[in-house]
Amino acid sequence: MMNPEQFRRAADQALGGLKADPALLHRARQLAATQRAQPRRANRVLAMAMSMALVFGVLTLVLPRLNAPRMNAVDTLAAGGPSLQGMRTTADLPRGSLVLSGDSQPKYQGVWERGSGGNFPLLRLDGRYYRLLSHPEDVTDLLGAQLGQVVTFTDEPALDAGNALLSNVAPQGTPVYEVTGLGRAALAAQVNGRARLFQRVAFAGSGLLSGETLRDTLPSGAIALQLSDVGTVQDAQAVSSLMNLLYTQAAYQGAGTQGGSQTLLVQYGNGVVLQLAVSGDSLSAAGTWSCPAFFEAFAAALP
Amino acid sequence: MSDSGPRAAPQPVSDEQVEQLYLKYGTDVLRVSYFYLGNRQQAEDVTQDVFVRLFETRPVLIPGSEKAWLLKVALNRCRDFWRSSWHKRVLLGSRKLDIIPDDDKLDQRLEREALMQAVNALPKAEKEVFLLFYYQGLSTQQTAEVLGTPEGTVSSRLSRGRQKLKQFLEEGEEP
């Protein structure tokens, strides 16, 4: 009969198949890194926000004139009054009421085409929205099968509750094509006589559809990643690793799109560049994804 | 303690030291957690938590006390699991421990399994003492430090546990 002194040997034999493997340590290390990164990033943001608030408050109180918008104003003069030599008059408006707006282009480089009004130039196919890209300017060489023709052309795509192929930039009857190698992540259609590329994005509360993942809207096979104000990663292994990090660790936050102050440009071997807006630890295109680990890894992967 | 860790001067543990501690004690932490909880997935979660905490907090570990620190954190996490799954225990009762042998030495298997099940069936307080003292080889003083109890309490729990174990192994009566 065994006694308590033999318990260690008995337990070691009985549980000999239970061993702490390297995968468990790897998971622990990853989890710790993620948990360490989040508070650090939050603290950084908080410190920056407090600094900004302090600086902004001082400027507002002490130097109010510096807080005025830096825009070009057109001098105006009441019509019918005494004219001044050499001055060009405009209309009977109060001084300063005509203002030339400053450049509203973002400072970062991006490929999302801008639109007029509240909408960007887009296509809708099967409930998925696609935004016109400024680059490349012609993708005739990448056209795949035709998927349909624009049925509804409207300036107010958000108000259309139907499911017809819709656009606010490609006229009715314009053929729409799939793009070789990009799956559901992009489409192409003729705009102003050229085959233009459209990237899958979120619009009017519509992000991922049921059963879709990030990979459906951001295909694998990238050859370079560029994070504005940070740098570019071109090493094939590093790019692949960073993309895998996104696929495996990015958490879907919802169909909302955060504007962000940075962009992540994802370049493919066929010349296509897709864009994600970056805000803090989040990336947005066809919905918003949170992935603090990606940014840590990106910084580490920079040459 | 005869089974000591790296003999470096006391300072916050480094990544390399965490890996060394995992290689040296990870399996002990996993097995003690498994014995305590009877659930492999939960035992792995506890082991992961212990090493996440080590990576995060970077404690200053006195050389020779590393294993006690790891087992203390593991047992605290096991207790959390134990408390959080009270309804399962109440509804389903105590589970018999599944043996996960390394090989098939059938000749001693029945005796070994009987001892394992007897220890597993001990009341929680006595099982903790058995795991640390008999299985992990801590002294009564170290066991008392890990559990936060007086050394005399450890001794009396060991004594009571031994009696119950003997009764179980001789008479087949569950402790």
Image (cartoon, rainbow, N blue to C red):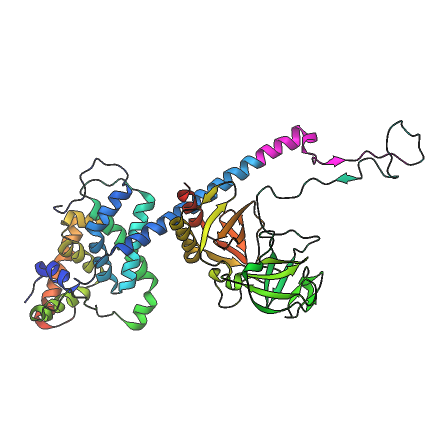
Nearest the viewer among A182 and A131 is: A182
Quadrant hosting residue A145: bottom right
Residue A205 visible somewhere in the drawing: no
User: Residue at the location (39% across, 48% down)?
Assistant: A238
Residue extending farthest front: A141
Nearest the viewer among A186 and A195 is: A195
User: Residue at the location (16% across, 45% down)?
Assistant: B4
State the quadrant of the N terminus of chain A: bottom left
Residue A95 image point, x, y percent: 82, 35
Nearest the viewer among B61 and A114 is: A114
Horizontal placement of B160 versus A54: left or right?
left
Residue B138 image point, x, y percent: 15, 50
In magenta segment, residue B79: no
In magenta segment, residue A67: yes
User: Residue at the location (33% across, 64% down)?
Assistant: B85
- Give the answer, above or below, for where A182 lies relative to A280: below
Residue A182 image point, x, y percent: 51, 61
Span shown in magenta: A53-79
Horizontal placement of A219 versus B88: left or right?
right
